[in-house]
Amino acid sequence: MTGGIGVANSVSAFIERKRRVIAAYKALGASSGLITRSFLLQVLIIALLGIGIGLLAGTALPFAAAGFLGSGLPIRLDIGFYPAPLLLATAYGLLIALIFILWPLGRARQIRAAELLRESVDGPTRWPPLSFAAGSILSALILGLMAVFLSEQPRIAAIALAAVGGTFLVFTALGLGFRKLARSLPRPRRPELALALGNIGGPAGLARTVTVSLGAGLTLLTAISITDASMTAELKTQLPEKAPSHFFVGINKNDFERFSGLIAANAPGSELNSAPMLRGQIVALKGTPVSQVKAPPEAQWVLNGDRGLTFAATPPADSEVVEGAWWPKDYSGEPLVSFEAELGRALGLTIGDSVTFNVLGRNITAKLANFRTVEWNSLNINFVMIFSPNTLAAAPYNMLATLIWPNSDPAGEAQVIRAVASDFPTVTSVRVRDALETVNNLLGQVFTAIRIAGSVTLLSGVLVLAGALSTIRARRIYEAVILKTLGASRRRILFAHLAEYTILGLATALAAAAAGACVAYILLTYVMEISFYAPLASLLQAAIFATICILAFGLFGTLRVLNAKAAPYLRAE
């Protein structure tokens, strides 16, 4: 989307440079259709060259990255030449080009020859002809349908597409709002600020271009930064406070009483929680083999391979029955099972359905008795599936235990681990803090990769911004010539431009920081269900980056404007 805006700006600038050529063609009798087809062909050839360069770079990048990424990834990279993705990328590129090429070409088609011959950099705002607007909209619809229906996860693709479109509309509206606000504000007494507000509110103002080109990338990076900080804080502070200190896996049920005594002797003041555990695999849902069940991607994992199973007479801690009812403590009827609510519903299960499990080579069909919500971030013992005790009590199983030791110290924990290893060599001990640290490191790598991907979006926005500043250079030179003629100094013009760019940068950064914080809040609160934490650094990075970018490119463009001589322009007028 951001790159497409850059394409539209470039096409507009290209047409602006060719004003006299177009006017000459029209004066010599060339039809608007002939001129439009000629320019459309030129722009499409350039677009195809750009697409070709992108395909070559995209094909070469995995080979270049494999050398230093391959050993750090948990999966094997199967790098090769795959024509289908390249053809799909070509189609996407052409559609994006058409979306953003047809609109400015259509607007240029409406300009009369007399207007093209004038030197004025302003003109009435025109809409493209209906055929051009329809072509642009149709290309956007085809692009959206391809992105959704050719994706392996259409729902996620549709949400992402809606988010991209929504972001574009929001920042377009913000840019127009900034322009309208600049027009309505009273003019400051300082000429520099008055010129800055006049430029922002003018018909060729940069407000919309700046907010759209930088806003999306800054919103993404702000949301990523806040999400990363919130998850890190959750893992390092909140989870360790309420999480067990150790997990013990593989305790023989006949040795559990002796194991409990060892823990009590070596960890005074601690609490040991336990649950029976064995492995089993779902083989049928409602009588249908799982090989024929089309589960959604977020639920497919539970059907793949063995899963941890348990049985209990009462609901475990940190879970709540939200549909159906728990079985009585002395229940002895047909096998019953309790399912985690979100996963069970994703599999299409309802209360009363049958679920068949293979446990130690024996198929057991249980009736779904209830759905539970589970507070997984407590890290206490819990299972997706829990059976009534009469279903699995006679099966061979081991015990899973957690140790909660509030006042533990490293020496005491080490003593417990040594004692368990000495007396129960088959029991696996897992220190929760070590596991959380490993998870935190993995998340750090994931967020680094996401930041790199997000930086590509931001880089595209920066390039679009640079292009937009280049397209208005003719207008800025024209204005600077008039101001110099009226007695304005180079210093005053420079300060006016810097004030304009600073206002736009800070306004865009504020909007992007607010939007990114809102996105992160929704994601953290309603999807991940963890506490929202927005450090000041995550919010300031948007303001700093946006302001530096626009000031750097703006200052470069302003110096070129100020170096332009007034005499040639005055003689031309």
Image: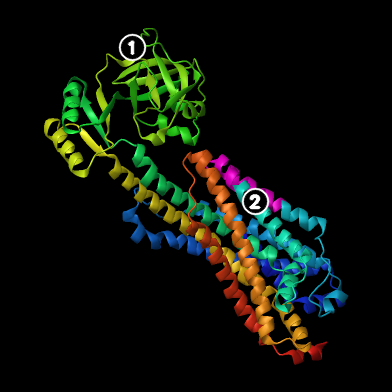
Give residue 88's position: percent from left, percent from top. Answer: 56, 52
Q: Nearer the viewer, residue 536 or 66?
A: 536
Residue 158 in magenta stretch: yes
Quadrant location, the N terminus: bottom right
Quarter of the image holding residue 327? top left
Identify the residue at horizontal 59%, vertical 44% (top origin): 159
Q: Is residue 169 above or below residue 367?
A: below
Residue 151 in magenta stretch: yes
In this image, 342 relative to 560: left or right?
A: left
| Label 2, residues with CA under 10 Å away: few <14, some 14-19, many ≥20 | few
Q: Which residue is mark 2?
A: 165
Q: Which residue is mark 1?
A: 390
Disc on res. 311? none
Q: Which residues are magenta?
A: 138-160
Identify the residue at horizontal 16%, vertical 23% (top origin): 258
Q: Nearer the viewer, residue 305 or 484?
A: 484
- The CA span between labels 2 and 1 is 54 Å
Give residue 405's position: percent from left, percent from top. Answer: 26, 35
